[in-house]
Image (cartoon, rainbow, N blue to C red):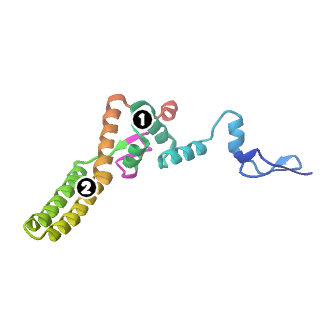
Amino acid sequence: MGVSVEGEGNRTAGKLYIEDRSVRTVHHHYYAEAAGRVPESQLQAEFHAHTGMWCPRCAREVLETLMLEHGFTAKDLAAAWKNDSVCWDAHAHRLVVRAPLVEALFGWGLVATCLGYFLSLVVPAINGPSAVFGASLALGGAIYLSACWMAFRFVLWPRRVALRVRRLMELEGVRCQSCDSLS
């Protein structure tokens, strides 16, 4: 008996081969969906497609709770997650927030240093020819704005999100429901 049955549309990864009444290749997602359940791998893939983050199931559940019930956006949480300001502690079954004051000092220090550099280029050129002043203003402005964007995007914004998560975790104690059911 060499029966070959095609799947329905894009819902199966390949063919279902039946030989001697035993199933050789089965796409588990299709059958799990038909039974009303969605496998964790599909939930993780959808979460990654939506947020850009790969994380454990419990972390995904907590992050989804933060987005659905507490006004966080996927972009905010992804910035904090990728910067390691928010991470998952598997032993404690909770989100851990790492937002040291040194990060904020570094970010603001970068902005202040670049502002000083910008002013050191522009101030001497104020009394000079307009072409020199314009070039100093353009070069210094581009450097300053780039440094400000980098400090905000990679240091200050993820830290701000992490502090919001920390405050919420302390006030409401958002936890993974799957982990709570285990204990």
Q: Which mark is residue 148?
A: 2
Residue at image coords 43%, 30%: 69
Q: Residue 128, percent across and down?
A: 9, 70
The picture places residue 103, in percent across and down from the top left corner, at 25, 52
Q: Is residue 183 magenta?
A: no
Residue 66 got which mark? Answer: 1
- Residue type at the position of mark 1: Leu
Q: Nearer the viewer, residue 132 or 140?
A: 132
Please indicate whether residue 136 sits to the left or right of residue 60 in the image: left
**Who comes first in sequence, dot 1 or dot 2?**
1
Q: Identify which residue is drawn at 30% across, 57% down.
A: 150
Measured as percent of width and height from the top left, residue 135 is found at 20, 68
**Depicted 151 relative to depicted 68: above or below:** below
- Look at the image and tell me whether residue 113 can be seen: yes
Quick one: which residue is furthest to the left in this view? Answer: 127
Q: Quadrant of residue 32?
A: top right
* Residue 71 in the figure: left or right of residue 10: left
Q: Which residues are magenta?
A: 82-95
Q: Residue at x 46, y 35 (%)?
A: 176
In this figure, what is the number of numbered marks? 2
